[in-house]
Structures are given as C-alpha cells and as structure tokens.
Amino acid sequence: MPFKRYVEIGRIALVNYGKDYGKLVVIVDVIDQNRALVDAPDMVRGQINFKRLTLTDIKIDIKRVPNKKTLVAALEAADVKNKWESSSWGRKLIVQKKRASLNDFDRFKIMLAKIKKAGVVRQELAKLKKETTA
Amino acid sequence: MSYKFHQFQVVGRALPTESDEQPKIYRMKLWATNEVRAKSKFWYYLRKLKKVKKSNGQMLAINEIFEKNPTTIKNYGIWLRYQSRTGYHNMYKEYRDTTLNGSIEQMYTEMASRHRVRHHCIQVIKTATIPAKLCKRESTKQFHNSKIKFPLVFKKVRPPTRKLKTTYKASRPNLFV
C-alpha cells in the first residue's frame, strides 16, 4: 500500500490534540523530522508536532512560508473550506458537532423525526412484502 | 510555547573602590530558567574571567531577551564546552528551530540523552543563526529543500485529551496513516 498523503508545503491537516483541536491548518514549512510550521487564517503562524496533526487529502499550491495575505488568497482560490465540508470526513465532523450541541428540545424533535421516518420505511416494507406474497 | 530556558542579558561590574573609581562594566548574555539563576550564573562566569566576586560587585541590569521572529525557521549553530567523565571538550551542534531558546532547550536535552551530560556541566560559548549554505550537519541540511515531501509512516491515533486516555484497549491499534 503506497502512501497517498504526504507532509509537504501546502498540505492541509487537521489538528487532533491540544489547544487548536479540530482546526484545519496548512503546513507552511517543515522544521525537522517531528515538527512543522503551520498557519491558518485565524491563528498566528506557529510550530506544531506531527503527532498532533492528521493529514487530509487536500493540498494547496503555495510557496514556502507565504505571508498571511497570500495564504488566505490561496486558500480561497483552492476553495478548501467547501472541499472540506463536502468531503465525507468533513461532513461527519459537522454532524458530530451538531449532535454534541443539541439541547433537550432538539433531541425531542429528533426522536419524533426518527419515529416518523421508521414509520414510513415500515409502510413501504409492508407494501413490498404484500406484493411478493401476492 | 513555553520554554524552560530563557535568555537574559546581565550587566554588572565590580564595586567602585578608592583605587578604581570607574570599574569596567561587563555584559553577558546567558541562558537560565529564571532571573535569580541568571544572576548567579553571571557571577560564576565573571569570577572565572575577572578578579571580581558577587560580594565585591554589583548587578547593574538584567533583562530578558525575547525572540524577534518566532514565526520563521532558522538554523542555529551552538558552540559549547562540556565536562564529560574524562575531561572537558568543545562541541559544535546545529539545530533547526523557530526560536533560539527552543534550540538551546533542544541542545540541553540532546546532550543529556546522547552524552549523559547534565545541564550544569555545559557552558554555551557562542550561538549564531547560520544561513542554509553554511550548515555543516547533514541532519539539518536534509531539511533545506523547498519541495520537501515525506509520508508519516507510523500514525498512532491518540485520544484528543489526556482525560480520555485508557490503560486497556479493546483492539490492537491500526498504525497505518
């Protein structure tokens, strides 16, 4: 199984530990074997250990250590936000966040919606069963 | 990023006497964990270089020096003198880091691990930021590549906070990416 996701300048990664947990950052330069210089539109450029990053499939085209303006422009041009939110990984994270932020009334509404959905599915199933037996 | 070692500029001189009204003022840049230690280290070095002790000297200023550009990567060269079990040796080490304090911390931990030299047996002679062309060590030169690209070979998935850490796990971890 060859590797598909590489640490390279322009790779988008997700922070999976620490203060910036859940943020998407761009690898802007590599310090040494264990650390990279990362940057995101809403944070100061800083170093982070690779152990705290999970690489994604998205890569943008930037030169080594661009300034903030160029970085933001490159992110816009590559449309990283939409690509991420439409990818299955990104969608799962959004759903997880939504579920974690529900209040009791939302959970009640979800319960009703689930019951309704199950009812419709069961109706269709009953119809299909009748057709096969008939 | 909090660093264990802070860089201080310490300025001191001997106390003025009848024979010497204006003693020479000496300034030193050194690394210590805090100001108190920095002052002590200053007198240690000054004693070795000049005929002055803390009891007949005075501290004029101590300021912490902060990194000017902590968001750029630099190659640091550190010249040091350390005491091994058999004698004193000089050494030159190179580190890639964003700040000088970070590279000094790397140096201390590396000396401890590679040579079993404790912090008090190390004297930093000189530090400098080295431009990429003048770096001597292969391990720093291998990162001087604008198109650097490598995969992360072993990826251990960690719980996102230490609170969620468990001693036992239900299944063996999958270390592939």
Image (cartoon, rainbow, N blue to C red):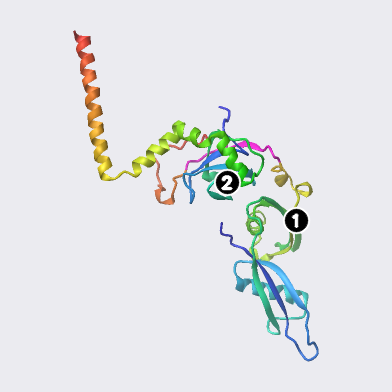
Tell if the residue under mark 1 belongs to the same chain as the one under mark 2: no
The reply to whether the C-beta atoms of the residues labelled 1 and 2 are less than 8 Å apart is no
- Position of A33 compared to B80: left or right? left
Residue that extends furthest to the bottom in the rendered view of this protein: B18
Residue A62 location (% of width, % of height) = 64, 38
In the image, the segment drawn in magenta is: B145-157
The one of A120 and B144 positioned closer to us in this rendering? A120
Residue under the point 27% across and 40% down: A107
- The residue to which callout 2 is attached is A39
Which numbered mark, 1 or 2, is in the foreground of this view?
2
Residue type at numbered disc 1: Tyr
Residue that badge 1 annotates: B92
Residue B25 in sight: yes
Label 1 marks which chain's residue?
A: B
Mark 1 is surrounded, within 10 Å at the Cα level, by few (under 14), some (14 to 19) or many (20 or more) other residues, namely some
Q: CA distance from mark 1 to mark 2?
A: 32 Å
Quadrant location of the N terminus of chain B in the rendered image: bottom right
